[in-house]
Image (cartoon, rainbow, N blue to C red):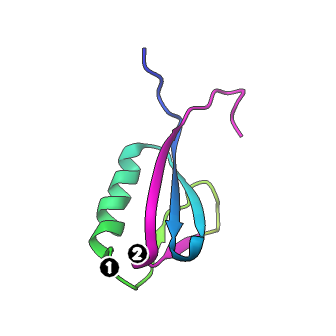
Amino acid sequence: MPRTPSEFSVHIMMEGGHREEVRFPTIQEFQKWYSGELMPKAASEDFISVPIKNVQGEYMVVRPARVVSLRVEPVYAGSVDRY
């Protein structure tokens, strides 16, 4: 039986070498944000919001034109391994 990821870690690499990590509970939520927010504005210098689900009261905005790459990795965590 295949394992199911607990969440997905998205590493955002930006111009100048800055990196950020955000987490999405499902791959579908990441795809919705990616195709609805990031891709349509890929060449834009205007800020877009990046959802930070696990940090209350904090938010992040990026300029889509400055995003160089994304790395998406599944996170498998059991109750003992969690954070």
Q: Which residue is mark 1?
A: 43
Q: Which residues are magenta?
A: 59-83
Residue 27, x across and y down, in percent: 40, 44
Residue 62, placed above or below residue 82:
below
Residue bearing the label numbered 2: 64
44 above or below 34? below
Residue 62 percent across, percent down from the top left: 49, 75
Left/right of residue 39 with respect to residue 30 in the rendered view: left
Amino acid found under the numbered disc labelled 2: Pro
Name the residue rendered at 43%, 43% in the picture: 26
Is the Cβ of the residue at disc 1 closer than 8 Å to that at disc 2? Answer: yes
Residue positioned 30% across, 67% down in the render: 39
Crowd around label 2: few <14 · some 14–19 · many ≥20 (10 Å): many
Q: Quadrant of the C terminus?
A: top right
Give the residue displayed 63% in from the left and 27% down from the top: 78
Check the image and name the residue furthest to the bottom: 45
What amino acid is labelled 1 in the image? Ala
Give 53 or 9, whichever is nearer the viewer: 9
